[in-house]
Image (cartoon, grey):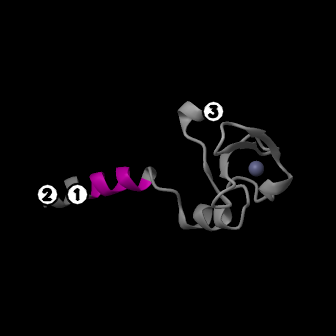
């Protein structure tokens, strides 16, 4: 019983660090996970040779990889 509770606590914590299926789907469509706007119309700045920083009008920041044409959420240290 005690072990079960402990396990639930851990799995909840892990879930927090994983983006939700809806957010993953929005990103795969090139859309903001917060407001659903298309990120191709968002403000882009070159971050380095490989990636672009994309700022949505709602304030969320993403990283775009032109090579794979994929977006992901920016990490805290990238903002
Ligand atoms: Zn947005």
Q: Secondary structure at mark 2?
A: helix
Q: Is residue 54 above or below residue 72?
A: above
Q: Nearer the viewer, residue 68 or 75?
A: 68
What whole-number distance in Å separates the C-alpha atoms at marks 2 and 3?
A: 39 Å
Circles 2 and 1: CB distance less than 8 Å? yes
Q: Give the residue number, with chain letter if any, for mark 1.
A: 7
For residue 68, side relative to residue 17 (left or right): right
Residue name at image x 70 percent, y 52 percent: 34
What whole-number distance in Å separates the C-alpha atoms at marks 1 and 3?
A: 33 Å
Expressed as whole percent of the image width and height from the top left, the position of residue 67 reads 65, 57
Q: Is residue 58 above or below residue 12?
A: above
Q: Give the residue number, with chain letter if any, for mark 3.
A: 79
Residue name at image x 44 percent, y 50 percent: 17
Choose top left, top right, bottom left or bottom right for residue 50.
top right
Q: Nearer the viewer, residue 7 or 34?
A: 34
Q: Nearer the viewer, mark 2 or mark 3?
A: 3
Q: Nearer the viewer, residue 55 or 51?
A: 51
Residue name at image x 52 percent, y 57 percent: 19
State whether label 3 is within 8 Å of ligand 1.
no
Q: What is the number of the mark on residue 3? A: 2
The span shown in magenta is 8-15
| Number of other residues with Cα within 10 Å of mark 1, as a class: few under 14, some 14 to 19, many 20 or more | few
């Amino acid at each position: 019983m005690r072990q079960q509770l402990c396990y639930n606590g851990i799995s909840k914590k892990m879930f927090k660090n994983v983006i939700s299926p809806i957010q993953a789907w929005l990103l795969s469509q090139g859309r903001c996970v917060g407001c659903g706007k298309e990120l191709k119309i968002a403000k882009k700045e070159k971050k380095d040779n490989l990636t672009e920083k994309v700022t949505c009008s709602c304030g969320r920041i993403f990283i775009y990889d032109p090579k794979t044409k994929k977006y992901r959420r920016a990490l805290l240290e990238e903002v």
